[in-house]
Amino acid sequence: SLTIGIVGLPNVGKSTLFNALTKNDVLAANYPFATIEPNVGVVGVPDPRLDTLAELFDSQRKLPATVDFVDIAGIVRGASEGEGLGNKFLANIRESDAICQVIRAFKDENVVHVDGKISPRDDIETINTELILADLQTIEKVLPRLQKEARLQKDKAAVVAAVEAAQKILEEGRTLFSAGIHNGTEQAALLRELFLLTTKPFLYVFNVDEDELVDEDFKNEQRALVAPAEAIFLNAKIESELIELDDDEALELLQSMGQDEPGLATLARVGFETLGLQTYLTAGPKEARAWTIKKGATAPEAAGVIHTDFQKGFIKAEIISFGDLIECGSVTEARAQGKARMEGKDYVMQDGDVVEFRFNV
Ligand code: GDP
């Protein structure tokens, strides 16, 4: 499955956040025999539709979609110089599908900042610089070979042009993602064989003081700093306390801080979006479940997420959109009202589709 790598300077609250994420691990809760890796936190994506479905179908359990967060510990500054730990740090980022930088905004004299001052802008630049330098090195290594190949193979010209354009952006000190070249775009496809780091989608977690959680001016400033990436604001310490509370107590604490959901929930949701994922839903007496697919997946591809045999033997998908199902109150009624659609193999799945697959075995 796709993963989000968590990076950041020392002492910004990464471990605090990551511990909260792993305590929230849905694997541990729902799959007691799953192997839990120490540096991976599997977090459920909150989806109130599952609660509604579970009620409607009297389901025994609810299984949300999940996002995998990987703790990429290690040195940051100087990583691109490629010595031991730096190599490992970059290799771990290379294996991630998105990069989540934790940034310190909280003020606490007892917690030393590595650069002696709190500056989200500088912290972002420090990380970006290492990733940009690593990408430039990659390009410098392969560009001469690509240019040579392009002289013999005409179709390589587009790749060379894309690589040269990328090099120019990086030399200006910009990440490719911030320049609009991210996975899923045509430009990024041309760069694919280089496995560049800065084409990965970025998102930012600002570890803030409690008063900053509700300071819209402050938050808008930070949002502007990281756009087009998403910014999430939370207090890592409070998050680690929230997961120790039961739901009612947690909600009360959140509301007292002007929040309507835990920061971890927001992070899971935004992370899921950032990875380019969406869900479809299934429900029955056993379970109500959200299944993860890539945006744009077809019905047979969606079936394949449940079981490869479902994809191979795919005949049709019976689909009722969540809103229609709730309005009708049951599958039988939805069918009677003509709200259940039979979709074939070319159907592109939509968010909120409640599905039953028909297949040959
Ligand atoms: P890491 O080096 O980025 O993993 O940072 P840690 O999670 O170890 O946090 C460094 C220190 O900052 C620890 O003493 C934490 O208790 C403290 N810390 C983390 N988050 C917060 C926060 O939101 N507010 C305050 N005041 N301290 C925090």
Image (cartoon, rainbow, N blue to C red):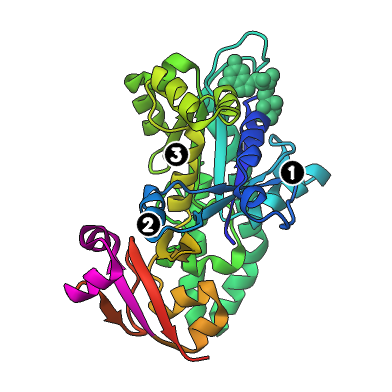
Q: Is residue 216 magenta?
A: no
What is the span of residues highlighted in magenta in the rendered image? 316-337
Which residue is located at x 59 percent, y 72 percent?
A: 146
What label does residue 291 carry, if any? none
Which residue is located at x 50 percent, y 22 percent?
A: 208
What label does residue 53 carry, if any? 2
Q: Is residue 137 left or right of residue 128?
A: right
Within 10 Å of disc 2 (Cα), the crowding (few <14, some 14-19, many 20+) is many
Q: Secondary structure at mark 2?
A: helix
Q: Secondary structure at mark 1?
A: helix
Indicate which disc, 2 or 3, sits on the residue closer to the N terminus. Answer: 2
Three-letter residue code for mark 2:
Leu
- Nearer the viewer's eye, disc 2 or disc 1? 2
Q: Secondary structure at mark 3?
A: helix
Nearest to the observer: residue 46 or residue 356: 356
Residue 261 position by quadrant: top left
As drawn, the residue found furthest toward the right would be 84
Three-letter residue code for mark 3:
Thr
Q: Position of residue 295 (x, y in %)?
A: 40, 64
**In 3D space, how far apart are the residues under numbered discs 2 and 3 (Cα atoms)?**
22 Å
Q: Is residue 82 left or right of residue 164?
A: right
What label does residue 266 carry, if any? 3
User: Mark 1 = which residue?
Assistant: 81
Three-letter residue code for mark 1:
Glu
Nearest to the observer: residue 231 or residue 89: 231
Q: Which part of the image, by quadrant, shows the N terminus?
A: bottom right
Residue 111 position by quadrant: top right
